[in-house]
Image (spheres, grey):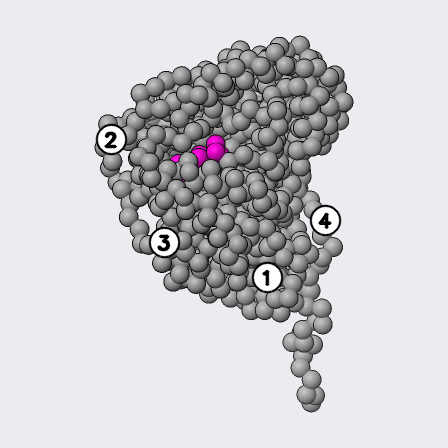
C-alpha cells in the first residue's frame, strides 16, 4: 500500500541520493518525492510517497542512514497533504472563456499563456489535481508538471518517533516504535 | 624594494599538506598498518606516508581486492578498524568486493581512495570513477573530500562510524588537490553526527519480559551470533548459559562465541548445520538470539523457522528486528549490555531434560552421520575429513592459532569438523560469500598477530582468485601464514549442488590449477603436496614448524560432499544426510 513518509535529512552532498538509493535497492515504487528547506538550518524536510508492504522495516533502514535525522510514517495519522500542479492547456481563443470558468471552478489560477495555450496553476490534494488534469485534457493535448506531495502531520511540532533510545523505555514503547508483534 | 616574499607565499609554520593531515589523522586513530596500492590520484598521500613510515606500516599488496581483504582480516582478528588504500578509478573499483564483504559481515573497515582533482571532477578525467556513488549501498557511510581543511573531522567521523554500534565499512574519497593543498589542521574536532544513533542502555521492560519468557520455557535455546564476539560478551554468554542450563547454538560467524567443548554447546545450525541442532530449533519454545541476524543460510525457509518458538531478539541494529523472523521481545542493545542486564534478571534454572532430548537426537543420528566420520572411500584415498581430523588435532594440541576460511565446501567442513573454542579464531566470509577472501585476510590477521600461526583453509577455486598475495607475504617477510588448500579440482560446492539437484551436469565446475607447491616455491614460500592419509598430520606439523609461510596442497577425493544439507528453499527441518537419505 502507499505510505506517506516525512523525513528530516541533513543537507549534505548525496543525502537525497542515499535515501532514494535505499528505496531503489529494495525495489520499491516511489510515487513522489518533494524536498526543501525545513525550519532548521542545514536540514531538509522531505515527503516521500512510496508503495510498500514493509514500511516499518524500510523506515528502520532509512534511519540507519547517517544523514537521516528522523522519519515518520503519517499514513495512519492525522495529516494534511497538498501538491501543486502546472497544467499547460490547449487554449485557442474560442475556448478561453470556458477554460477560465473551469479553472475558477477548481480554485486554480491562470498564471501565463500565449496565443495557443494557457498555464494553469493549482494547489490541492493529489486527487483533486488529477481531476483538473482530466478536465484539461478535454480541451486537447496538455502538458503537466506536478510538485510531488507535501505532507504535514497535525498536532504539536517536533513530535519524534525515532529519537535515541530512552533510558526507561517500556516494552509498549518499543512495540510501538518497532512494530514488533 | 625588498627581497622577502609576500606574506601569503610563506607557509604558516603549522601548515601541512592534506596528505600529511591524512597520515596524522591515521596516527591519531591508532592505526598501525594499512594495506594498499599507490596510483596517480593517491600519490600525494604516499609521498607524505614516507615521513610517517616509522609509525604507519604500509603493506603493498598485489591487487586492491587483496588489500581490502587483508584489512578485513586485520579487523576481524583484532576488533579494530582495518585500513585499505587505493587510487581512483580501477584501484577504487577493485575495493568494491571487500567493501561489500565488510558490509555484509559487519567488519569495521576504512577505505581511503584517491580521486581526480576537483577541477576535473565529473569530466571523465583519466582514472575517474564515482566511487562514492558506487559504494553508496555497501557502506555505512562515505565521504568525498575536496577541501584539506575538512580532513580532520572527516577522518574522526569515519573511524567513529566504522567502529561504533554495528561495525561496518566507511569510504573516504579524497581529491588529489585536497591532498596537495596546505592547511593549518584544526584537530579540535567534535564528533557531530546527529543522524547516527547507537543504542545507549537497555530497555529494562524488554529485559524483564525476556527473562520471564526464559524462566517459563521448557525448551529454551540460545542462538549466538557474531554480535557476541564484536561486543566482547563471551564471558557473559557463558555465565548466562551456565546459570540457566540453556543449550547454545553458534552461527557460522558466532563460532568461537561459546566453546564447542562446553557441555551446553550443541553446534552450528542452518543449511549445513547438524540434524540435532536444526531439530532443536524447530522444537524449542523460546529462542534467545543474541547478535545474529537470521540469515537465510541459518533459517532455511524463514516462514517455517522455529515454528513453536517465541523469539527474543537481541541486536544493536533496530533494522534487524523483525526483518526475517517474527519477534516476541526485541532488545535493541549491545550484546554485552543486554547479556549483563539479562543476567541480573534471570534466576538460575536448568534445562537438563531438554538438553538430554537434544543429545538423544544427536546420538540417534551420530552413528549414521557419515559427515562426522570419515566417509567411505577406497582405503588410501585422501578424504577432506582426513585433512580436517589432522588439522583439528594439531590446532588443539598446539593452540596459538587463528583460522581464516574462504567460501565453499572447505569452509563448511572447517566449521563442522574443527572444534572451535575461542573468539576471533574463526574468520570467514559469511554474508557475501566472497571467494578469494582467505589468503589476503590470513595475511592481514598474521600481521596483527605475529606471535600466532594463522591458518588459511581454502579451496583450489578460491585460492586461485587471490593467490598473487603470496608475493606480498614474501616481500613483507610474513612468516606465520600456513595455507591449506583442500584441492578437489572442482568448484566443489557448485559441483555438489549440480550432483544433488541438477542430475550431475558438471557445467563449468571442473577446475585445473598449477602445482601449488611449485607455485609456492616460485613465490619464495615452502610448498607441500599431500595425497596420502598418513602424510597429512606430518605435513601439517612440518609446515607449522617451518620458519616461514607455507602452502599445503591437499589433493583430496574429488567428489566428497558436505552433509548434512538443507536443500535450498526448504525448511531446516528437512535435511539430506547423504545422497538419497533424509533426516
Give the image location of residue B502, x and y in percent. Answer: 26, 28
Q: Residue at x 75, y 26 (%)?
A: A167
Q: If you read the primary sequence from the N terminus, does the residue marked by circle 1 or circle 4 appear first? A: 1
3 vs 2, front mark: 3
2 vs 1, front mark: 2
Give A68 or B109, whichever is nearer the viewer: B109
Give the image location of residue A71, x and y in percent. Answer: 59, 29
From mark 3 to mark 4, how far is it between C-alphas? 51 Å
Crowding at mark 2 (Cα within 10 Å: few <14, some 14-19, many 20+)? few
Q: Residue at x 46, y 48 (%)?
A: B538
Q: Which residue is disc 4 drawn over?
A: B190
What span is in magenta?
Answer: B409-417
Q: Quadrant of the N terminus of chain B?
A: bottom right
Q: Which residue is disc 3 drawn over?
A: B516
From mark 3 to mark 2, how far is it between C-alphas? 28 Å
Give the image location of residue B147, x and y in percent. Answer: 59, 59
Crowding at mark 4 (Cα within 10 Å: few <14, some 14-19, many 20+)? few
Q: Chain of mark 1?
A: B
Position of residue B473 relative to residue B375, above or below, is: below
Q: Is residue B395 visible?
A: yes
Mark 2 element type: loop
Whether discs 2 and 1 lie on one chain: the answer is yes
Position of residue B194 relative to residue B249, above or below, is: below
Q: Which residue is disc 2 drawn over?
A: B504
Q: Is residue A82 magenta?
A: no
Amino acid at each position: 500500500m502507499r505510505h506517506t513518509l516525512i523525513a528530516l535529512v541533513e543537507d549534505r552532498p548525496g543525502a537525497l541520493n542515499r535515501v532514494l538509493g535505499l528505496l531503489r535497492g529494495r525495489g520499491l515504487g516511489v510515487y513522489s518525492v518533494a524536498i526543501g528547506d525545513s525550519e532548521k538550518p542545514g536540514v531538509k524536510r522531505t515527503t516521500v510517497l512510496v508503495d510498500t508492504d514493509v514500511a516499518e522495516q524500510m523506515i528502520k533502514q532509512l534511519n540507519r542512514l547517517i544523514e537521516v535525522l528522523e522519519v515518520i510514517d503519517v499514513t495512519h495519522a492525522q495529516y494534511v497533504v497538498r501538491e501543486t500542479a502546472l497544467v499547460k492547456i490547449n487554449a485557442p481563443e474560442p475556448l478561453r472563456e470556458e477554460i477560465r470558468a473551469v479553472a475558477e471552478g477548481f480554485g486554480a489560477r491562470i498564471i501565463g499563456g500565449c496565443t495557443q495555450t494557457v498555464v494553469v496553476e493549482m494547489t490541492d490534494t493529489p486527487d483533486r489535481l488529477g481531476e483538473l488534469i482530466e478536465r484539461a485534457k478535454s480541451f486537447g493535448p496538455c502538458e503537466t508538471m506536478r510538485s510531488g506531495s507535501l505532507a504535514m502531520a497535525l498536532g504539536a511540532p517536533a513530535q519524534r518517533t525515532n529519537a535515541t533510545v530512552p533510558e526507561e523505555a517500556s516494552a509498549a514503547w518499543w512495540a510501538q516504535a518497532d512494530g514488533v508483534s | 624594494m625588498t627581497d622577502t616574499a609576500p606574506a601569503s607565499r610563506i607557509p604558516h609554520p603549522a601548515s601541512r599538506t592534506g596528505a600529511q593531515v591524512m597520515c596524522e589523522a591515521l596516527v591519531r586513530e591508532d592505526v598501525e598498518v594499512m594495506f594498499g596500492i599507490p596510483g596517480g590520484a593517491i600519490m600525494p598521500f604516499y609521498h607524505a606516508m614516507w615521513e610517517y613510515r616509522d609509525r604507519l606500516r604500509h603493506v603493498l599488496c598485489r591487487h586492491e581486492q587483496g588489500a581490502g581483504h587483508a584489512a578485513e582480516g586485520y579487523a576481524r582478528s583484532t576488533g579494530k578498524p582495518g585500513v585499505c588504500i587505493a587510487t581512483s578509478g580501477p584501484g577504487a573499483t577493485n575495493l568494491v568486493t571487500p567493501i561489500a564483504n565488510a558490509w555484509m559481515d559487519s567488519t569495521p573497515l576504512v577505505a581511503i581512495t584517491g580521486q581526480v582533482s576537483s577541477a576535473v571532477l565529473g569530466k571523465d578525467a583519466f582514472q575517474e570513477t564515482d566511487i562514492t556513488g558506487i559504494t553508496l549501498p555497501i557502506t555505512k557511510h562515505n565521504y568525498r573530500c575536496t577541501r584539506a581543511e575538512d580532513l580532520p573531522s572527516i577522518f574522526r567521523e569515519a573511524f567513529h562510524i566504522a567502529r561504533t554500534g554495528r561495525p561496518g565499512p566507511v569510504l573516504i574519497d579524497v581529491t588529489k588537490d585536497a591532498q596537495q593543498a596546505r592547511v593549518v589542521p584544526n584537530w579540535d574536532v567534535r564528533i557531530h553526527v546527529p543522524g547516527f544513533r547507537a543504542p545507549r542502555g537497555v530497555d529494562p521492560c524488554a529485559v524483564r519480559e525476556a527473562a520471564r519468557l526464559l524462566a517459563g520455557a521448557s525448551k529454551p535455546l540460545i542462538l549466538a551470533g557474531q554480535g557476541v564476539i564484536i561486543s566482547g560478551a563471551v564471558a557473559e554468554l557463558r555465565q548466562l548459559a551456565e546459570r540457566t542450563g540453556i543449550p547454545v547454538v553458534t552461527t557460522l560467524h558466532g563460532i568461537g562465541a561459546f566453546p564447542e567443548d562446553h557441555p551446553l554447546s550443541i553446534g552450528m545450525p542452518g543449511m549445513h548445520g547438524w540434524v540435532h541442532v536444526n531439530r532443536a530449533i524447530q522444537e524449542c519454545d523460546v529462542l534467545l538470539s543474541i547478535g545474529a541476524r537470521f540469515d537465510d543460510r541459518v533459517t532455511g525457509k524463514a516462514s517455517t523457522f522455529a515454528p513453536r518458538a517465541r523469539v527474543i531478539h537481541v541486536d544493536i541494529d533496530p533494522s534487524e528486528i523483525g526483518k526475517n523472523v517474527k519477534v516476541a521481545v526485541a532488545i535493541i542493545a549491545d550484546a554485552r549490555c543486554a547479556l549483563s542486564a539479562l543476567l541480573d534478571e534471570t534466576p538460575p534454572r536448568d534445562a537438563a531434560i531438554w538438553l538430554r532430548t537434544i543429545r538423544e537426537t544427536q546420538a540417534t543420528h551420530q552413528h549414521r552421520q557419515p559427515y562426522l566420520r570419515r566417509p567411505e572411500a577406497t582405503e588410501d584415498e585422501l578424504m577432506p575429513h582426513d585433512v580436517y581430523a589432522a588439522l583439528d588435532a594439531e590446532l588443539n594440541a598446539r593452540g596459538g592459532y587463528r583460522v581464516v576460511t574462504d567460501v565453499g565446501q572447505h569452509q563448511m567442513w572447517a566449521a563442522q569438523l574443527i572444534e572451535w573454542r575461542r573468539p576471533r579464531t574463526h574468520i570467514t566470509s559469511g554474508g557475501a560469500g566472497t571467494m578469494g577472501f582467505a589468503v589476503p585476510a590470513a595475511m592481514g590477521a598474521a600481521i596483527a598477530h605475529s606471535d600466532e600461526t594463522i591458518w588459511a583453509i581454502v579451496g583450489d577455486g578460491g585460492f586461485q582468485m587471490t593467490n598473487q598475495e603470496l608475493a606480498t607475504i614474501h616481500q613483507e617477510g610474513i612468516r606465520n601464514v600456513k595455507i591449506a588448500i583442500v584441492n578437489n579440482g572442482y568448484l566443489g560446492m557448485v559441483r555438489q549442488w549440480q550432483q544433488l539437484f541438477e542430475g550431475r551436469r558438471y557445467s563449468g565446475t571442473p577446475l585445473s590449477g598449477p602445482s601449488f607447491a611449485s607455485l609456492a616455491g616460485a613465490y619464495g614460500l615452502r610448498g607441500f603436496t599431500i595425497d596420502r592419509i598418513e602424510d597429512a598430520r606430518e605435513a601439517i606439523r612440518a609446515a607449522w614448524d617451518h620458519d616461514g609461510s607455507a602452502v599445503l596442497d591437499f589433493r583430496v577425493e574429488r567428489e566428497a560432499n558436505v552433509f548434512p544439507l538443507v536443500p535450498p528453499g526448504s525448511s531446516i527441518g528437512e535435511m539430506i544426510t547423504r545422497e538419497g537419505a533424509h533426516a
